[in-house]
């Protein structure tokens, strides 16, 4: 047995089902070992797409997604997706081929010091230089990637080490045991909650990672405390729940801003500061905060908790609930916020303008998708509207990258989502800019049999940057581009292509596209004049009741 074969056996022991990647000269021995493995190797069209697939696979399953590249340009292409997983808290193991150790000391074809290069974008990484260490390195990689806060790790395998004979066997994965919070901290939290007049719960990605949706909903319901979620915490409480205040984090004043301006206590549950800076909702650092998570809070002058409850989130919430007194009644502000948000949201259901307003597009998408179906959002202006208007009944049914926020994630992410949940409908929501960054992976989707719909918000430019330019300078520049005929583009891949030509076309088109047995692409012209209108409206928002 050689080192590459032992590496693959270790991956099998970790329960790896898929490896996403590209073949290369320096990873040939790994690929050869995979031919007789239970692991399915999915050949992608670009290493960035492979890393995004592993990223979303890890986020949906809690188990590390695995991606593979060769050295040099293959490895540098992998980095964007690896960095995205690391900042978004998705477990991922990246494996790279490398030149032999016998030529690392000289200038060598395609050689880069990959351990040093990946160090800033991973939790841990290592190069296998002794075949006998392979089992330990792989076991540590998965343990580090999957423990809180999850993220990316990297293993570098030189080609001469890959061929060396080795004796050994995979190590058994360890069980991840629960950790429990200190009773004193939970008592302190309960006292603060019982004294608060107008508390609010802020839930982040850690609430989803900790499978704490049920406990959070029960906690909020029993104590009568409203709940807001970050972009990455969508669905942690059903959006139809009367205490749900939907999503915060737009970095512009919105209805939910009023709730934070008038609160006297924020109960942050599974909240990562990278998701939405506390300086946006607690700029003076004056709002008392209770931090409930699986790890201690990051240091930030606007986020200094009066109590930190570190341990299993569900158990912590249940124990705090037992010690706390419910809030007698919701504040008038919260009631009005909820009423205004729902009224505005429902108002776009009958809008027949064309090009279609983003609010209308997202409203109709929600009507077509079942509670368990999945939307993967790319990054761009549409992401801000999806964050604000695409509401979820269940966790992990709308995935938004908001730590690294990398364009091009939607299509690769949809492939991974369909592999994890083949029984669900999946939509990759993307702008025309993000679409063209990884549209080549539609061939991968067709080849591996993952049928989903790519919904393009088409404005012929980089709409989010245009929005920010207009807010800052009153005009935009350098953001317009041309596009191919997306319908013909889809058909050239052997996919189904559609173009929306009126508001009434949208729902029938979505339904037909989702019913296809091949991937489908929908080109939908979008009216992004709504961006500046929203900015003007939010700038004049009055929080007084």
Image: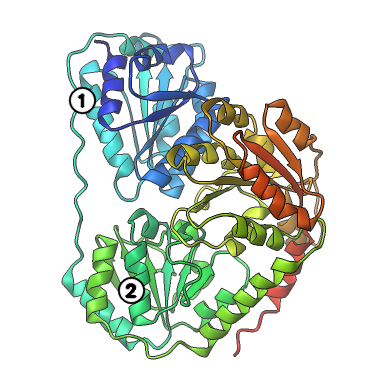
Q: Quadrant of the C terminus?
A: bottom right
- Asked if residue 357 is positioned above or below residue 483 in the image, the reply reads below
Is residue 467 positioned above or below 509 on the image? below
The quarter of the picture where residue 363 lies is bottom right
Q: Say whether disc 2 or disc 1 marks the residue closer to the N-terminus.
A: 1
Residue at 65%, 33% in the rendered image: 439
The label number, if any, that marks residue 170 in the structure image: 1
In which quadrant of the rendered view does residue 98 lie? top left
Observer-nearest residue: 3 or 245?
A: 245
**Contact, mark 2 vs mark 1 (Cβ under 8 Å):** no
Category of crowding for the residue at label 1, using alpha-carbon neighbours closer than 10 angstroms: few (below 14), some (14–19), many (at least 20): some
Residue 243 visible in the snapshot: yes
For the residues marked 2 and 1, what is the alpha-carbon distance in whole angstroms?
A: 42 Å
Q: Nearer the viewer, mark 2 or mark 1?
A: 2
Between residues 212 and 505, which one lies in front from this camera angle?
505
Q: Position of residue 115 (x, y in %)?
A: 39, 28
Q: Say which residue label 2 marks.
A: 219
Q: Quadrant of the N terminus?
A: top left
């Amino acid at each position: 047995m050689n080192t590459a074969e032992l590496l693959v056996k270790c991956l099998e022991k970790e329960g790896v089902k898929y490896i996403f990647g590209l073949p290369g000269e320096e990873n040939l021995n790994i690929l050869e070992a995979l031919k007789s493995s239970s692991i399915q190797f999915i050949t992608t069209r670009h290493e960035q797409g492979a890393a995004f697939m592993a990223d979303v696979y890890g986020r949906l399953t809690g188990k590390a997604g695995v991606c593979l590249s060769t050295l040099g340009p293959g490895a540098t292409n992998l980095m964007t997706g690896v960095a995205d997983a690391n900042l978004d808290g998705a477990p991922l193991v990246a494996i790279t081929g490398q030149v032999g150790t016998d030529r690392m000391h000289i200038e060598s074809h395609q050689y880069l010091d990959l351990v040093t290069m990946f160090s800033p974008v991973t939790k841990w990484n290592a190069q296998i230089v002794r075949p006998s260490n392979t089992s330990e390195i792989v076991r540590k990689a998965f343990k580090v990637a999957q423990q809180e806060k999850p993220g990316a790790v990297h293993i570098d395998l030189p080609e001469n080490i890959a061929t060396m004979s080795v004796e050994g066997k995979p190590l058994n994965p360890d069980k991840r045991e629960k950790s429990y919070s200190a009773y004193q901290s939970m008592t302190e939290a309960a006292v603060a909650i019982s004294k608060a007049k107008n508390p609010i719960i802020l839930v982040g990605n850690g609430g989803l990672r900790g499978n704490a949706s049920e406990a959070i909903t029960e906690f909020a319901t029993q104590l009568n405390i409203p709940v807001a979620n970050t972009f990455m915490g969508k669905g942690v409480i059903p959006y139809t729940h009367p205490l749900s205040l939907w999503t915060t984090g737009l970095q512009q004043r919105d209805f939910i801003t009023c709730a934070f301006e008038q609160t006297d206590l924020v109960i942050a549950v599974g909240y990562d500061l990278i998701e939405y800076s506390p300086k946006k909702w607690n700029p003076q650092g004056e709002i008392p905060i209770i931090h409930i998570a699986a790890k201690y809070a990051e240091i930030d002058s606007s986020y200094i908790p009066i109590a930190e409850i570190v341990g299993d989130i569900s158990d912590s919430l249940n124990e705090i609930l037992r010690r706390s007194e419910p809030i007698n009644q919701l504040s008038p502000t919260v009631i009005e916020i909820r009423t205004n948000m729902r009224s505005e949201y429902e108002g776009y259901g009958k809008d027949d303008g064309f090009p279609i307003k983003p609010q209308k597009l997202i409203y109709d998408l929600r009507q077509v998708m079942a509670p368990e179906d999945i939307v993967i959002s790319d990054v761009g202006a549409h992401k801000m509207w999806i964050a604000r208007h695409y509401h979820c009944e269940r966790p992990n049914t709308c995935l938004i990258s908001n730590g690294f926020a990398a364009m091009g994630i939607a299509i690769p992410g949809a492939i991974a989502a369909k592999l994890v949940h083949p029984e669900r409908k999946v939509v990759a929501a993307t702008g025309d800019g993000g679409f063209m960054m990884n549209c080549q992976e539609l061939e991968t989707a067709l080849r591996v049999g993952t049928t989903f719909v790519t919904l393009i918000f088409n404005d012929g430019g980089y709409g989010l940057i245009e929005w920010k330019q207009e807010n800052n300078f009153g005009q935009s520049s350098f953001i317009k581009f041309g596009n191919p005929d997306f319908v013909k583009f889809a058909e050239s891949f052997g996919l189904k292509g559609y173009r929306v030509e009126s508001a009434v076309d949208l729902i029938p088109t979505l339904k037909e596209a989702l019913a296809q047995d091949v991937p489908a692409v929908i080109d939908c012209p979008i009216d992004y004049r709504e961006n500046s209108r929203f900015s003007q409206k939010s700038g004049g928002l009055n929080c007084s009741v």
